[in-house]
Image (cartoon, rainbow, N blue to C red):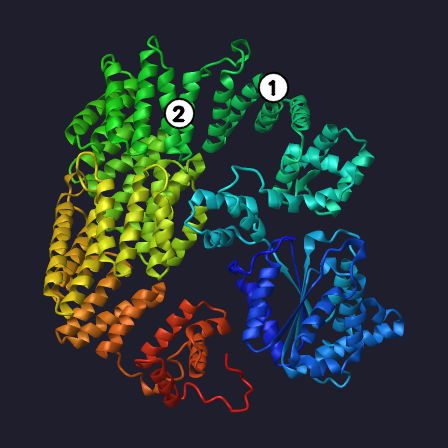
Amino acid sequence: MPTISSATPLIGREDELARLAGVLERARGGQAGAVLVAGDAGVGKTRMLDEVAGLASRSGMTVLTGHCVDLGDVGLPYLPFTEVLGVLAADARFTEILAAHPVVDRLLGGGADAGRDTGGRLRLFEGIAGLLADLADTAPLLLVLEDLHWADQSSRDLLRFLLSRGILQRSAGGAPTHRLAVFASYRADDLHRRHPLRPLLAELVRLPSVERLELRPMPDAEVARLVRALGERPLPDTTVRRIVERAEGNAFYAEELLAATDTEAGGVPSGLADVLLIRFEQLSDTAQQVLRTAAVAGRRVEHDLLRDAVGLPEEELESALREAVGRQLLVPGAQDTYTFRHALAREAVYADLLPGERARLHGAFARLLTGRGRRAESASERAHHYRESHDLAEALAASLEAADHARSLGAPAEELRHLETALDLWQAVEPSRRPTGEGIERVTLTLRASAAAAHAGQAHRAVSLTRAALAGVGQDADSELAARVRYTLAGNLMGVDSLTAAFAYSSEALAMIPADPPSPTWVWAAATHVLAARQVGEDGIALRLAREALGVAEQLDVADARADLLISLAVLEGGGRRTRQGREQLREARDLARRSGNAPVEMRALFNLAVGCFESGDLDECLPWLTEGLDRARRAGLLSSPYPLEMRYLRLLVLYTLGRWEECVRAATADADVLPAAGGYTVAPALYAALARGDLTAADRARTLLEGPFDWMGTLVAGIVLTDAAARQGDPEEAVERLRSTVAALTAEAGTPPDVTVRLAALALSAVADRAAALRLTGDEAGARGWSDTATELRDLARRTAARGEGGIPQGPEGQAWLARAEAEWTRAVSGLDAEAWGRAVAAFDFGDVYELARCQVRFAEALLAAERREEAAVQARAARETAVRLGATPLLEQVDALIRRGRLAGPPAADTHATVLTAREQEVLRLLALGRSNRQIGEELFITGKTASVHVSNILAKLGAASRTEAVAVAYRQGLITPEPSGSGRRPS
């Protein structure tokens, strides 16, 4: 029986929990009610009821739980109720109440005999109802009945009586009902058409006091949260995505798949397979045969195709299908199709086939599909079935056909899969049986596969494939093909940051093709060498060759190569892409690439236009270029290729910088569902926001970016998050070490530190300054001087990097702002707070970085306060506080509130504003504060997190000008914001 461990965190059920909690609250007030909780096996019904039971218990309710058990045709009568009564009988607190209902005692002792005759049965039912009523009159009562789909007939009858005539219904005089709630769960996917629970459910949901709650499969984002919460260590995004994809919203399946990640290479975990096959094994032999055949077809199968493959008469097939649909294993769909209700059920049935049986059925489907004509859209299916039936020549032909179809649809990942299948089959197929035609040759197919891999975001796979193509190029190979392979390899090597090797291969490619006579191959080899030369710091070579190659491209009228070279020149010449001239050149390149139909070059132009705006501080102007670039990538099917991945990151970074964090997080969540493994870094700005909101698990997620092959952007992102996290945790040693290791890993082979060095230095300096200031306060001048020396080293590194910048161009507004913060942190570390230095940092971040501006404003306020400039300090503190509240940046809010209280920077609220000074939610929190509730208890009562409750409490303290919770309550009483609770309210302290 699949259940979810009580240790499993409850995730993604906030609405359902709130609804059940509302029923509990009404029951405590004397309005009885029942909820029938429906959902598939493993979707989380038990976990939800455990959470609600805990909530009820903490609020003072008595909680009784009874379970139905699958005992087949010999089920024990009244089993869930005898379990409840057994619990009551073992508890001395209920002895007196049980003694008042002797008929119940007979049920405990005699089971079915107590209710054999009609009169005795009625007395038993009335006795149980009376017992529950007396219990509810003593203390509010929650009765939980689990797995009603296994309930025996007697239990179903008793439940009908209790809900329709007993404890839930008002008397004829309209007296209040009892303080009672009944929550009963059942598996919706177990209720076949003739299931005996069906008519009872239909009857009960018509009652006014009974409602139905369906637990639907969890959204993918919530399953991902669950998997990460359950993992004993940070999990790579690819692992999480694969589990989420296969679990299809089922929490139990997700748990089982997670548990199998370290032990099974693929397939369905054995324990889960056993659960999934239980319902399959309850089918007739004919229905099982149909299901096995359908499983070979895939998740979905057409009726006609299944009929021809299984070879049964129509009447027998329909009977078997009706049985499978009734057991909710198959779901009928549009256009005469059937789909497995869950993909894992299909996998389990498929895995249960014998090898020979599997190959035979695959062959049958392959022949049937071929007999329908070689439609392009069926090529993938034909390739799969021919391969699994061991007809390799037909599989090779169909795989190439499927690859062509995928390319026409702009689906590079699928094109790559089919091309790799074709390459695997190539040697196994006799040369005489291989397809022929232009480009159908092993080296060219391998080169094409490497391009598909690059477009699908699989940079390391692209390198491996291009190396394989290079190995296949013989001494007598065409020089143009040999050069093409080499400059393609150079481009792919740059994608994995192997820059020296890229420069070497692009040099070889250029040397293999003479510049005269001019040729498009030479132009593209030159364009690639320009990029590689720039990456290794050979800007002189890059600039000279770009100008030469541009002239040849214009002469030959190779428009997309012209566009690519114009982009390189726009970055290399003058002030680069930040200048108006540079951006005009990039627009020209974009138009040329668009007219030529070269989407990758067009996206490179759009990316550089966006980066130029960002580097200039024109953040709002940046977003339209990113929108255009991503839209172009979407239409071309290239969203996972390198430049669109960079654009995804930059879009989120702009939203984060502008303080549009909710947009940033939503976009990151959407992106995470479709990103390739190499694109995990692109959602990083959402990690920056999570860290700023106090979620230190963001650091664990950042560490996963360092797993696997080296990735430049992943290392950069992890460096930012982990350096900042160390600084927030007061660990300057770790912050400095993380800065140094990140800069060392990212430093170009020419020895140039990356631009992000300035930001990393500023973040590490904040931790160094905290430590130096703390040591100075304790009188440890020697220790403070040691950290001052470290601070000077970091400041000098920031200065050198900011002055030089990428390509020798000084950094723009963002880099200069981080340098200003580094300078201010250095001053704080060496000599203490300097209002002028922090004022410059505030001014520098005013280009649009909302959060970093607020962080600097807090330090500026602190420095102004130390300089006795209280009014100016209050202005800065209030501005920072408004930003922190708007962004939900709890740690910053706590920091600024502490400063406001310490410096007495908050003025008293106006006398006539007490009615509106607090929001409705803050008034609820204030009421609970007055009752002495902790943040956790406030969160539980209002169904919000403890962290959110903490933010509301901080807001209340600031608005009331109070330094403590006690003072806030006193001020609130004086201003009439709250009134004392009546002594007879009956409210129970938690």
* Residue type, mark 1 in image: Asp
Residue 333 at x, y percent in the picture: 68, 42
> Dot 1 corresponds to which residue?
391
> What is the secondary structure assignment of the residue under circle 2?
helix
Answer whether residue 37 is visible to the viewer in this image. Answer: yes
The reply, left or right, for residue 272 in relation to residue 594 is right
The reply, left or right, for residue 478 in relation to residue 374 is left
Is 524 drawn above or below residue 896 in the view shown? above
User: Which quadrant of the view contains residue 458?
Assistant: top left
Q: Within 10 angstroms of label 2, few (less than 14), some, or many (20 or more) residues?
A: many
Residue 660 at x, y percent in the picture: 35, 57
* Residue type, mark 2 in image: Leu
Q: Within 10 angstroms of label 1, few (less than 14), some, or many (20 or more) residues?
A: some
Is 128 drawn above or below residue 851 in the view shown? below
Badge number at residue 94: none
> Dot 2 corresponds to which residue?
465
Residue 983 at x, y percent in the picture: 51, 91
Is 279 drawn above or below residue 851 in the view shown? above
Residue ID at (53%, 39%): 264
User: Which quadrant of the view contains residue 531?
Assistant: top left
Residue 930 at x, y percent in the picture: 43, 83
> What is the secondary structure assignment of the residue under circle 1?
loop
Is 282 drawn above or below residue 459 in the view shown? below
The reply, left or right, for residue 403 in relation to residue 757 is right
